[in-house]
Amino acid sequence: MKILTLVRQVPDAEARIKITAQNVDLEGATLVIDGMDEYGVEEALRLRESGANVEEIVALAVGPKRVEDALRTALAMGVDRAIHVETDVKLDPIALSRVVAQVAQQEGVKLILVGGQEADWDSQALGAATAERLGWPQLTWTNELKLEGDTLSGRHDVDDGNESFRAGLPAVVTTQQGLNEPRYPTLPNIMKAKKKELRKDDLDRYGVQPAVRVINNEIQTRARLNRMIDGKDPQAAAEQLLDLLRNEAKVIA
């Protein structure tokens, strides 16, 4: 069987990013694989290493040329080959799910691993939208996963705690922190990754257009009132603060 794991590229959590009302400037920022997607890459490798009948692990990324770096990292971790749908068009989760579903069908994939919530979107829609397009079951927020033949089993988070599950393949699984601890690529594997296949596709091949278009960005700002309160009389200071919060800041009723 084949596993498809999605790779998205986002700024490192500690990177300094310049933000204006017009755009987010990533120039000079450190970019990495989205953390939740990285758990998916690691889990695909672990499923194969556990003895499951995994023929091939394919990483997929959709985005600009720089996303190739994230795919190279996935290849260095141990993924067999990669597909890069290169485009500067920003796709929302619903549009991206069309690409993921088509690649899965073309590749004969039986298991898709995607991050439960992408850092740049703050959205959980991709896994569900992909599963819906393919008519496959979806297992969300997994924190334990096993593969025996064509049967998945494990545990995942639910509102009241967590629960065990069993499901047949094909399936879509969303991954999260706690599922595993991603490995660091070793130098030999980084060198090997340079020889692995990284196929370039054009977005037009998939006939996909954004379902949602962002027409304007606005950064919310709020001016400071800079009111000074005399603290010599605690009771009077408390009353003055209460008045300012209620009548000027209007944060309390």
Image (spheres, rainbow, N blue to C red):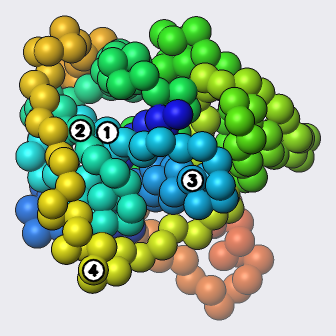
Q: Looking at the image, do the residues carrying marks 1 and 4 touch, with CB atoms under 8 Å apart?
A: no
User: Distance between the Cα atoms at labels 4 and 2?
Assistant: 22 Å
- What element does badge 1 sit on? strand
User: Distance between the Cα atoms at labels 1 and 4?
Assistant: 23 Å
Q: Earlier in the sequence, mark 1 or mark 3?
A: 3
Could you say which is closer to the camera, residue 23 or residue 84? Answer: 84
Q: Residue at x 48, y 72 (%)?
A: 183
Q: Which residue is mark 1?
A: 60
User: Distance between the Cα atoms at labels 1 and 3?
Assistant: 18 Å
Name the kind of residue labelled 3 in the image. Answer: Arg
User: Distance between the Cα atoms at labels 3 and 2?
Assistant: 20 Å
Q: Which residue is mark 2?
A: 83
Classify 10 Å Cα crowding around label 2: few (below 14), some (14-19), many (20 and above): many
Q: Residue at x 64, y 48 (%)?
A: 52
Q: Which residue is mark 3?
A: 48
Asked if residue 126 lies left or right of residue 107, the reply is right
Where does residue 91 sit, x and y in percent of width and height?
Answer: 26, 26
Q: Earlier in the sequence, mark 3 or mark 2?
A: 3
Q: Earlier in the sequence, mark 2 or mark 1?
A: 1
Q: Which mark is residue 207?
A: none
Where does residue 170 sit, x and y in percent of width and height?
Answer: 60, 23
- What element does badge 3 sit on? helix
Q: Nearer the viewer, mark 4 or mark 2?
A: 4
Q: Which residue is mark 4?
A: 188
Q: Earlier in the sequence, mark 4 or mark 2?
A: 2
Q: Looking at the image, do the residues carrying marks 4 and 2 touch, with CB atoms under 8 Å apart?
A: no
Above or below for 97 versus 180: above
Classify 10 Å Cα crowding around label 4: few (below 14), some (14-19), many (20 and above): few
Q: Looking at the image, do the residues carrying marks 3 and 4 touch, with CB atoms under 8 Å apart?
A: no
Q: Earlier in the sequence, mark 3 or mark 4?
A: 3
